[in-house]
Amino acid sequence: MIASREWLSPKLIGEILGRSELVVASSLHACITGVSYGVPVVRVPGSNSSDQKFKLLNKFQGVANIHDKKAGAMVIQHNREIEPEAVECADRLDRYWDQVMDVICNPSLFNSQRSMRLMLGWAAKIFGDIETAALTARP
């Protein structure tokens, strides 16, 4: 296990998951990454586990719900092989992360200005509240 305050890059996280013996995750991306490397996956439903996007995982033999003990045992004993459908999902996931990086590294002018306005408004409110609290606390 790696202890760090820094976020690891998605590619490094993918490599770590790909070299694992088992992936236990609630994240769709982590599950797809595990499956794309042929790593058995035990999915832990999150707070929004009814989300339609998780139905994608039902077609993989290498994925089991943590509440299904029999399926979990079968997945853990499953041979480490990459299912053909996983390759397509992994390619889609790679394209998704490339798009995320593009948005971060090359934001549109509209979104940059909007973000700046929102952050400045938020900061002004916070500091205004602090100043108001300081003034009302004086005797």
Image: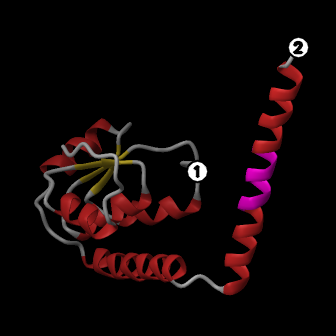
Which quadrant would residue 36 be assigned to in this image? Answer: bottom left
Between disc 2 and disc 1, whose residue precedes? 1
Residue 87 drawn above or below residue 15:
below
Q: Which residue is mark 2?
A: 139
Residue 91 drawn above or below residue 114:
below
Residue 137 drawn above or below residue 135:
above
Q: Nearer the viewer, residue 124 or 115?
A: 124
Tag 1: amino acid:
Ser
Q: Classify residue 49 as left or right of residue 86.
A: right
Tag 2: amino acid:
Pro
At a point 45% along the width and 66% down the height, the residue shown is: 56
Q: Secondary structure at mark 2?
A: loop
Q: Which residues are magenta?
A: 119-126
Other residues around mark 2 within 10 Å, as few (<14) / some (14–19) / many (≥20): few
Q: Classify residue 104 as left or right of residue 115.
A: left
Q: Which residue is mark 1?
A: 50
